[in-house]
Image (cartoon, rainbow, N blue to C red):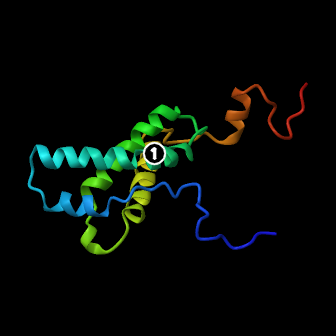
Amino acid sequence: MRTHATATAKHPHDDAPDTAEAFRRLCALPQGPGREALRQELVRAWLPMAERLAGRFGNRGESLEDLRQVAALGLVKAVDRYDPDRGTAFESFAVPTITGEVKRHFRDHMWTLRPPPRPRLARRGRPRPGHRPR
């Protein structure tokens, strides 16, 4: 039987970095090398989360390395578009942004038309349902 978690117990993904202040600084900085360095630091800090999200989409016909790159791209977009003044946590904004980017990748790079099951089964060498060999 499960009991309630204690204050010291951690969820496996409670390794989220505390970057709220860094995001506030990022929004206040003008374009330039200082802003770019802070942006890169934020992306590196949150990259493990993006890789975890990419792992959810493994074994779907795309290499895990490609999915990690797509998730990293989604993370960069999330860092660029996040507004800390809206009052939401970065995770709440980043997770849908990253998963949306990965889903968009599948939509754009997988088959646009899936053949019906019968031709797919025949191509794999399986008999069609209800088909009797002669």
Side of 64 relative to 134 (left or right): left
At 59% from the left and 55% from the top, the residue drawn is: 12
At 31% from the left and 63% from the top, the residue drawn is: 20
Nearer to me, 55 or 31: 31
Relative to 41, is 59 above or below? Answer: above
Nearer to me, 82 or 32: 32
Q: Amino acid at mark 1?
A: Pro
Nearer to me, 71 or 119: 71
Q: Position of residue 49 (x, y in %)?
A: 46, 50
Q: Residues within 10 Å of mark 1 (few under 14, many from 20)?
A: some
Side of 118 relative to 38 (left or right): right
Q: Position of residue 70 (x, y in %)?
A: 40, 41
Quarter of the image holding residue 95? bottom left
Quarter of the picture holding the C terminus: top right
Quarter of the image holding residue 24? bottom left
Side of 112 relative to 125 (left or right): left
Nearer to me, 45 or 126: 45
Residue at the spot of label 1: 48
Quarter of the picture holding the N terminus: bottom right
What SS does tag 1 mark?
A: helix
At 27% from the left and 68% from the top, the residue drawn is: 84
Quarter of the image holding residue 82? bottom left
Q: Position of residue 108 (x, y in %)?
A: 42, 42
At 45% from the left and 38% from the top, the residue drawn is: 68
